[in-house]
């Protein structure tokens, strides 16, 4: 941190001097924008491999606040739903394990945002999507520039940029279940200085209800983002300098639970929640600051970013049931729900509160503190014939767990008062995991006329260690058990290449190959895979079409034990398990067409489709994966996914869209059986908006207009979960 403070002081002083120096230089317009990786969809086409961009205009059609819904419009991106709002997403790219998006590189404005990208990558924090102005997705060879998770790819969320001129925006939204969302942006722009402050508040009572309880199942979430920018004048004869500062703060309190429903109870009411979960609550806070310096020399551009993320959370929730095993059942939630699905009356009685003999509910304060800090350096050199990019990143991160149990009796549908247990001594609930990592990448793009070649290289070096303490006061590390223990000290190097050949002005062919890996520190070997894609693109003024065939060949797949992942057996959270060889192959299709009628009305149509076949190639047994035979499907990965959207835009300011989302079948475990199936399902969303003035428009959004009630997931904890029911939202956007 001393280096960071010194660097910040130097750059601030330098920037102020530049502002003074350039005061008498003729000003040219400065483009103020969020830091991007790709830039735009037109630029995405030029990226090595497949990439997609969802713009702010795209996001405004539905004003989605669930990242899962947004990513459904990008081929090759899958997900496992959870609570219907996307608060803690489970994202997969080309078949990577979806649980808490732990195998996808997640970024906001190019900065890693997983709570602890190396020590604990599970995305228990995710940026509030309602304040996001765009989404970039990188797949294929381009993914190796955005590690550490390079098998599937990377997702970069673009925060709201500083307005191009002094002013702002207010978006006020109301919906069912007491839902209200307010998004306010204020910006001031001068010749060499720009500033913005953004506020986003979001609250709801939730669409589920808790049996025998008046508590709701919603949340309150507040965000504040402050941006400040200093820049020199843009002059072709001078070096352009830019300094950006960003501060973000968010708070969330949500009444969310890990406990789903048995199949019988789901059929009775898919939006019920068991009364034994009434105490469940997530309380978290995230804080980030970053400083970015840019120097543009013309053909050469240099940027440096320093950042720090701090995330604290306590998810107080049911962990075990019936610790004394009065009913002869296993005490894990998974065991109770599985037993209920097999028709055991004792399990159903416990879940529904009809048990006449009290059982003990064991709740855990899943109390954790995460930190991550890093430095990103990047040099880019461009000519008419080539583009060379060199990047370096150093990071430190940590996860601190201090998790205390509490207990309550449960009988006849009533929860007794909480009794606090002893603070943890030596255990997995009293530990600190920390890591250090460095990464280097280089990418060279060579333009040979109709043929463009891309060559990439990435090296990653990481070390993960853990302390477990002897007592609750943490007087010492348990050296007798081998702590402090180095969980891993490893490195990996990757190569990637791509080639694009322009067959004509409208058609191009491309091929890409890259090696990918996923670092692990939980006892398993690192995940490694070879990735291949072949594709064709067709582009005209009103048409875009892309077809891709991809194959991922895992030399070693691994899974990490988490409370959210629904492990088949018992395991310590954070431990990793090898799954051996696996093969994922599929096709991706993207079509966009715009028709314009003689009266000026525009009809945009888009289709995205993904078909995936993902199987284990070897047989094995583990407490995480269960008993796996070669040829079994990877869990929680739908075999197909489709999004079909049809819209209209009229000169009088009316616009509308209707989108069909269709998701194929899957299973929550490899050895698919009763109580683990997830059948295919469909959802239709519609939106309608009207520009009532140059600066004001109103909109209406109806999600799940046919009110489908399907099982969309069986995790966490093996319980059945439904999608959000029919939900109507109205809002107004005002620019000023």
Image (cartoon, rainbow, N blue to C red):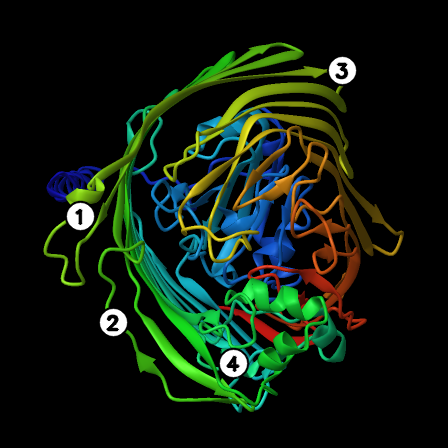
* Residue on which disc 4 sits: 276
**Is residue 95 rendered to the left or right of residue 519?**
right
Which class describes the residues within 10 Å of circle 2: few (<14), some (14-19), or many (20+)?
few
Q: Earlier in the sequence, mark 2 or mark 1?
A: 2
Which class describes the residues within 10 Å of circle 1: few (<14), some (14-19), or many (20+)?
some
- From this viewpoint, is residue 307 visible? no
From this viewpoint, which residue is outermost toward the top? 448
From this viewpoint, which residue is outermost toward the right? 598
Q: Looking at the picture, how far across and down is residue 144, in whole percent?
A: 48, 27
* Residue on which disc 2 sits: 422
Under circle 3, the secondary element is loop
| Cα–Cα span, label 1 and label 3 | 65 Å
Q: Is residue 517 above or below residue 255?
A: above
Which class describes the residues within 10 Å of circle 4: few (<14), some (14-19), or many (20+)?
many
| Cα–Cα span, label 2 and label 3 | 70 Å
Residue in the image at 51% along x and 30% along y: 143
* Residue on which disc 1 sits: 478
The quarter holding residue 35 reads top left
Q: Looking at the picture, how far across and down is residue 152, in whole percent?
A: 56, 34
Q: Earlier in the sequence, mark 4 or mark 2?
A: 4
């Amino acid at each position: 941190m001393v280096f960071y403070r010194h660097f910040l002081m130097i750059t601030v002083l330098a920037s102020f001097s530049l502002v003074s120096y350039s005061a008498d230089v003729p000003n040219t317009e400065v483009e103020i924008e969020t830091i991007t990786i790709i830039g735009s969809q037109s630029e995405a086409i030029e990226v090595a491999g497949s990439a997609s961009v969802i713009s702010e205009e795209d996001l405004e059609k539905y004003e989605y606040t669930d990242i899962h819904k947004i990513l459904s419009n990008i081929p090759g991106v899958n997900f496992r739903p959870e609570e219907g709002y996307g608060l803690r997403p489970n994202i997969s790219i080309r078949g990577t394990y979806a649980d808490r998006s732990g195998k996808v590189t997640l970024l906001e404005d190019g900065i890693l945002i997983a709570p602890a990208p190396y020590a604990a990558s599970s995305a228990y924090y995710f940026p509030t999507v309602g304040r996001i102005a765009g989404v970039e997705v990188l797949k294929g060879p381009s993914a190796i520039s955005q590690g550490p998770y390079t098998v599937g790819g990377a997702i970069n969320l673009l925060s709201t940029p500083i307005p191009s001129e002094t002013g702002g925006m207010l978006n006020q939204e109301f919906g069912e279940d007491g839902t209200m969302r307010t998004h306010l942006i204020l910006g001031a722009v001068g010749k060499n200085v720009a500033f913005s402050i953004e506020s986003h508040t979001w609250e709801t009572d939730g669409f589920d209800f808790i049996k025998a309880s008046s508590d709701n199942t919603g949340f309150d979430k507040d965000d504040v983002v402050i941006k400040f920018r200093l820049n020199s004048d843009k002059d072709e004869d001078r070096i352009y300098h830019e300094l950006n500062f960003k501060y973000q703060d968010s708070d969330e309190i949500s009444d969310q639970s890990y406990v789903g429903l048995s199949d019988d109870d789901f059929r009775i009411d898919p939006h019920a929640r068991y009364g034994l979960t009434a105490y469940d609550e997530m309380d978290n806070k995230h804080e980030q600051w970053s400083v970015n310096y840019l120097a543009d020399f013309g053909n050469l551009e240099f940027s440096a970013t320093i950042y720090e993320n701090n995330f604290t959370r306590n998810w107080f929730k049911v962990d075990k049931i019936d610790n004394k095993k009065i009913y002869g059942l296993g005490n894990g939630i998974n065991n109770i729900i599985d037993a209920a699905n097999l028709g055991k009356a004792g399990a159903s009685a416990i879940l529904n509160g009809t048990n006449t003999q009290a059982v003990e509910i064991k709740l855990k304060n899943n109390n954790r503190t995460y930190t991550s800090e890093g430095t990103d350096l990047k040099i880019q050199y461009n000519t008419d014939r080539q583009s060379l990019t060199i990047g370096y990143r150093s990071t430190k991160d940590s996860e601190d767990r201090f998790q205390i149990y509490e207990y309550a009796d449960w009988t006849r549908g009533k929860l007794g008062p909480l009794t606090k247990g002893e603070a943890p001594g030596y255990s997995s609930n009293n530990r600190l995991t920390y890591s250090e990592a460095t990464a280097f990448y280089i990418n060279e793009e060579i333009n040979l006329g109709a043929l463009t070649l891309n060559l990439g290289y990435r090296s990653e070096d990481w070390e993960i260690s853990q302390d477990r303490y002897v007592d609750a006061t943490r007087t010492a590390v348990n050296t007798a058990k081998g702590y402090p223990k180095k969980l891993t000290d490893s490195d990996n190097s990757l190569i990637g290449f791509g080639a694009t050949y322009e067959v004509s002005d409208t058609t191009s062919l491309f091929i890409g190959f890259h090696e990918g890996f996923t670092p692990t520190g939980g006892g398993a070997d690192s995940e490694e895979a070879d990735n291949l894609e072949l594709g064709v693109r067709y582009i005209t003024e009103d048409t875009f079409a892309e077809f891709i065939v991809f194959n991922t060949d895992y030399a070693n797949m691994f899974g990490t034990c988490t409370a959210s992942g629904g492990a088949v057996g018992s395991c310590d959270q954070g431990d990793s398990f090898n799954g051996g060889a696996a093969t994922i192959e599929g096709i991706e299709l993207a079509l966009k067409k715009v028709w314009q009628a003689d009266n000026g009305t525009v009809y945009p149509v888009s289709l995205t489709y993904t078909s995936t076949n993902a199987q284990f190639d070897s047989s094995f047994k583990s407490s995480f994966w269960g008993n796996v035979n070669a040829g079994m499907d990877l869990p929680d990965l739908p075999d197909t996914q489709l999004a079909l959207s049809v819209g209209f835009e009229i000169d009088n300011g009316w616009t509308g869209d209707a989108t069909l989302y269709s998701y194929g079948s899957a299973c929550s475990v490899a050895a698919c059986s009763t109580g683990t199936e997830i059948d295919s399902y469909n959802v239709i969303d519609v939106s309608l908006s009207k520009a009532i003035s140059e600066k004001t428009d109103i909109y209406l959004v109806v999600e799940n207009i046919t009110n489908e009630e399907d099982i969309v997931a069986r995790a966490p904890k093996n319980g059945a979960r439904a999608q959000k029911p029919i939900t109507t939202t109205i809002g107004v956007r005002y620019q000023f």
